[in-house]
Each structure stands twice: as structure tokens, then as C-alpha cells.
Image (spheres, rainbow, N blue to C red):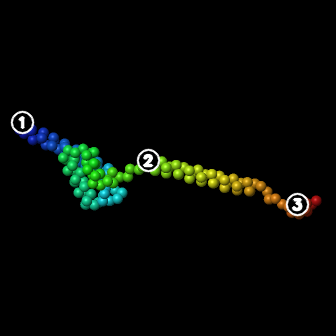
Amino acid sequence: MSASEPTQAAPEAAAPAFEAEQLTNQLSHDLMSPYCPGRTVATCPSPQARKLEMFILKEAESGKSREQIEEVLVARYPDILGYKGRPELIIGLGVVALLAMLGLFLAARRWTSKRATTAATPEKHTQRQQDALDDILDQTEGF
């Protein structure tokens, strides 16, 4: 039985280490890097990002949960969770975009209707011009 005890102890010890590595991997892909703007900790090529991953791993190995690790990191790096948009700004931007599209639609409609009415209405001639056109028309038709 002494031969089977070390083999059972090794998988039990490996399970927490594997879970800690998984948590570190998840956090490093979810959290924004304080060293590389616009990149996650995992995609940042900075050596400081690797140190941050090691810190996350040590915290996970010590038994801390994801939320506890995030609290520690947010206290140190406030922007690590990434940009959390303010809903009123996003909704306001959507309303402004809709109003701009409506304004463009109405302006285009008005512009095209003016062109159609000006093209459809004949020019107004004075009586003298109308008589001259009638005379030319009579001459060409042989009257």
C-alpha cells in the first residue's frame, strides 16, 4: 500500500496547481494590461506583464478566489478591468446618430423634391416671347 500512497498524493497536489494555472490564464486574458494600452495581460510583450502573471499565479496558489485577486489588482491598477462604458453616454450617442440620420434623410428628400419640381415646371415666358415662339412654330409647320 505504501507504493500506491505517493501516486494518489501526487494527483491531489496537482489539482490545486492546475486550478491556479487555469485561473491565472483566465485572468490574464480577461484583464487589461497596465503596461500595454489596449492589450490584455496575456498579449502584452512587456516583462512587467509576466511579473504580473506570476503575482496572479501566486495569489491563486494561495487559495484566493477570482474576485479577491481582482480586488487586489484593481486597488493597484484601477483601469485593469478595462473600459466600462457609461450607459447614458452610449444611449445618448445612439440618439444623436438617429437624429443625424433623420436630418440627412429629410434634407435629401427636400433637395430631390426641389429638383423634380423645377424640372417639371416649364419656364414662364412673357407674352412677347410667347408670340415670337408661336410665329416660329407657324413658320416651321407651314401655316
Question: How far separated are the C-alphas under marks 3 and 2?
Answer: 67 Å
Q: Which mark is residue 114?
A: none
- Picture quarter with the C terminus: bottom right
Left or right: residue 98 versus residue 3 is right
- Picture quarter with the N terminus: top left
Mark 2 neighbour density, 10 Å: few (under 14) some (14–19) many (20 or more): few
Instruction: Name which residue type carries label 1.
Output: Met
Disc 1 target residue: 1
In the rendered image, residue 68, in percent from the top left (x then y), is placed at 25, 46
Q: Earlier in the sequence, mark 1 or mark 2?
A: 1
Left or right: residue 48 versus residue 83 is left
Residue 121 visible? The answer is yes
Disc 3 target residue: 127
Instruction: Name which residue type carries label 2.
Output: Pro
Left or right: residue 81 versus residue 121 is left
Secondary element type, mark 3: helix
Disc 2 target residue: 87
Q: Residue furthest top?
A: 1
The quadrant in which residue 140 appears is bottom right
Mark 1 neighbour density, 10 Å: few (under 14) some (14–19) many (20 or more): few
Question: How far separated are the C-alphas under marks 1 and 3?
Answer: 124 Å
Residue drawn at x 31%, y 56% is 33
Residue drawn at x 56%, y 50% is 99
Secondary element type, mark 1: loop
1 vs 2, front mark: 2
In the rendered image, residue 85, in percent from the top left (x then y), is placed at 41, 50
Residue drawn at x 30%, y 59% is 35
Q: Nearer the viewer, residue 15 or 76?
A: 76
Q: Residue furthest right?
A: 143
Left or right: residue 93 versus residue 33 is right
